[in-house]
Amino acid sequence: MTKPSALDIPHSPAMPKPSEDGAPPKLSEGGSLAGDLIATAAQLAGVIPQIEAAGRVAIDTEADSLHSYREKLCLLQVSVPVTGAVVLRPRDDAGPGLRPPAPIRDRRSPLQLHDFVVDPLADVDLAPLRSALECPEIVLHGADYDLRMLRRGLNFVPRRIFDTMIAARLLGIREFSLAALVKRYFGLELPKGSQKANWAHRPLPTRMTEYAINDVRYLLPLAEELEAELDRYCRLDWLRQSCRRAIEQAAVQRVRDENELWRISGSGSLRGREAAVLRALWQWREKEAEVADRPPFHILQNHELLNAAVAFASRNVPDYRHFSSRRRQAFRQAAQCAMQLPESEWPVSRRRVGRRPGPETVRATEELRRRRDQAARELNLEPAFIAPRSTLEAIATNQTRAASLLVPWQQELLGITA
């Protein structure tokens, strides 16, 4: 069955009408334009007052992780409420899940928007933007990645966030991607494409700017709709708890043992000399990727790295046509050096630490699972969203871990008391 596009869906006079090619509408009369790319200090100064005056600001980010060795913040999309723009209205036919008694249509202050894109790669001091964003609540979708990019690229950690993905899941909505939620509430089909584009490319093509704006332009009205539903079901405090935890988790530095980074997926099946060669090839690939400023998989993908390690250990010499003569020589040299290592310098196989859970722990885990599943059925929530199986097992083993693994509303549903 062909999925309807935005053109197939009736629109009220208040809803911006999609273009003839089915793309989401381009806002006008104070709304968003594809050319709203902030790349100078003067342009930035022009939008700072709008941000400072807003109680809630929507943000999305784009990075170049698929195109560089060390990803960097390439775009910062911002949506702020202003006057003189269009008004987005919810649809009448919201899908399954918890649904409000009736769509909200009559508001005293309809939400009006101005969307723009800030270029962090331009020679502009972003300190004024960072300062302006300190007070408003920041609306994000799937906040974890954006929070880490904001921290790394803008040195900014918001005080309060509204994660529309968490909000949707708290309402029992199973299709909670941004595209699915925009379709559900506003009847618009977000265009695909540009997900894998190089966001560090300059000048930025208009189609990419428009794609980036689409990722932020619906977040504020979407947050209003989700907030109203959460309020009806007395789950707003659940959202606040989960969003606070999201900020805390994103602030934690993810540190891995430098000596263990080479253990990629599938490496557990390699032993002895094979593992030594894999480690050497992984280190070679990292150096090549850093020099070329490309992601490691551009040099050689993980499965090829594993196959090469096995081949070298079997006295075969793999080859790749896309290698230059210099890269081919370095590749083979790295493997040969590993082949000559004494057994005492081979990587030690990792073994799982711990023991099988005892009967009491198994019973405790099953009791937590029973409570979780019952609450999930009664509240129309995904069981794993309340608590995944691994979390239940960890708490059954040591209940003092509940506070660090679960927020209060999750603990309450599981019957865990402090």
Image (cartoon, grey):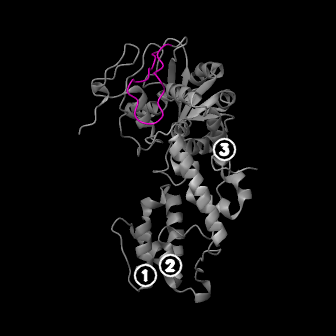
The numbered disc on residue 35 is: none
Q: Is residue 265 magenta?
A: no
Q: Which residues are magenta?
A: 86-106
The image shows residue 117, relative to residue 387, as above or below, that is above
Where is 382 relative to 334, above or below? above
Q: Residue at x 49, y 52 (%)?
A: 68
Instruction: Tell me which numbered mark, 3 or 2, is placed earlier along the sequence.
Output: 3
Whether residue 417 sits left or right of residue 189 in the image: it is: right
Q: Nearer the viewer, residue 169 or 88?
A: 169
Q: Nearer the viewer, mark 3 or mark 2?
A: 3
Name the amino acid, label 3. Arg
Instruction: Inspect the image, locate mark 1, and give the three-letter code of the amino acid beneath it.
Output: Phe
Residue that carries the numbered disc 1 in the rendered image? 312
- Which numbered disc, 3 or 1, marks the residue closer to the eye? 3
Whether residue 256 can be seen here: no
Badge 3 density bin: few <14, some 14–19, many ≥20, Cα 10 Å:
some
Type of amino acid under label 2: Val
* Disc 1/disc 2 C-alpha distance (Å): 7 Å
Q: Are marks 3 and 2 in contact (CB under 8 Å)?
A: no
Give the residue number, with chain letter if any, for mark 2.
277
Mark identifier at residue 245? 3
Q: Secondary structure at mark 1?
A: helix
| Disc 3 from disc 1: Cα separation | 47 Å
Residue 370 percent location from the top left of the image: 57, 55
Overall secondary structure of the magenta stretch? loop
Helix, strand or loop for disc 3: helix
Q: Position of residue 417 (x, y in %)?
A: 73, 50
